[in-house]
Image: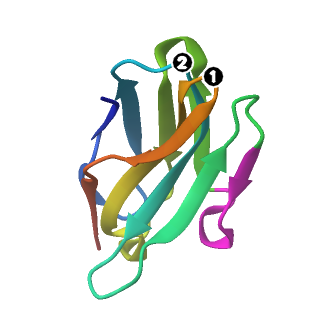
């Protein structure tokens, strides 16, 4: 069974920084694309940033220049460095990973989410 575990959320003042981490654990062949999503109260879940296995990255326009996604393939981890945080960044942040359970079987997994609250 594959599990994703996020950490690093918390309360920070506007303009501050946080670093989120997500670790994939369990028995699997490899991790492929990984991504961070977020969901604010009353809103739909939205893509924040994604990164391929070879570290090609994409960002939502609302975080470009402020957030950086990275990964460590050896540790099956993905990170989200969040700088210049705004009140509107307040949300539950979720990690998503595309996992090759075996060389021929790929599945998507979600973490349980970590709360990020930015105060004014």
Which residue range is magenta in the image? Answer: 57-65
Q: Is residue 97 above or below residue 112?
A: above
CA separation in Å, label 1 and label 2:
6 Å
Q: Which quadrant of the view contains residue 51?
A: top right
| Residue tagged 2 | 29
Q: Nearer the viewer, residue 77 or 67?
A: 77
Residue 4 in picture, x, y percent from top left? 34, 36
In screen coordinates, is 7 left or right of 22? left
Residue 27 in picture, x, y percent from top left? 38, 18
Q: Is residue 46 above or below residue 108?
A: below
In screen coordinates, is 38 left or right of 52? left
- Quadrant where the image shows the C terminus: bottom left
- Quadrant where the image shows the N terminus: top left
Of circles 1 and 2, which is in front?
A: 1
Residue 30 in picture, x, y percent from top left? 57, 22
In this view of the protein, can residue 15 be seen by the observer? yes
Q: Is residue 73 above or below residue 44?
A: above
Residue 74 on the magenta span: no
> Helix, strand or loop at disc 1?
loop
Q: Which quadrant of the view contains residue 87?
A: bottom left
| Residue tagged 1 | 103
Q: Residue furthest front?
A: 104
Residue 115 in picture, x, y percent from top left? 24, 57
In screen coordinates, is 108 left or right of 93? right
Residue 59 on the magenta span: yes
């Amino acid at each position: 069974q594959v599990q994703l575990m996020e950490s690093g959320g918390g309360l920070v003042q506007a303009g501050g920084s946080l670093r989120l981490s997500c670790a994939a654990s369990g028995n699997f062949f490899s991790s492929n694309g990984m991504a961070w999503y977020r969901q604010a109260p009353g809103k739909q879940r939205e893509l924040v940033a994604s990164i391929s296995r070879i570290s090609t990255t994409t960002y939502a326009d609302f975080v470009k220049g402020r957030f950086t996604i990275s990964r460590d393939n050896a540790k099956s981890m993905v990170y989200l460095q969040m700088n210049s945080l705004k009140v509107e960044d307040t949300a539950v942040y979720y990690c998503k990973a595309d996992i090759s359970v075996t060389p021929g079987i790929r599945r998507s997994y979600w973490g349980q989410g970590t709360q990020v609250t930015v105060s004014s």
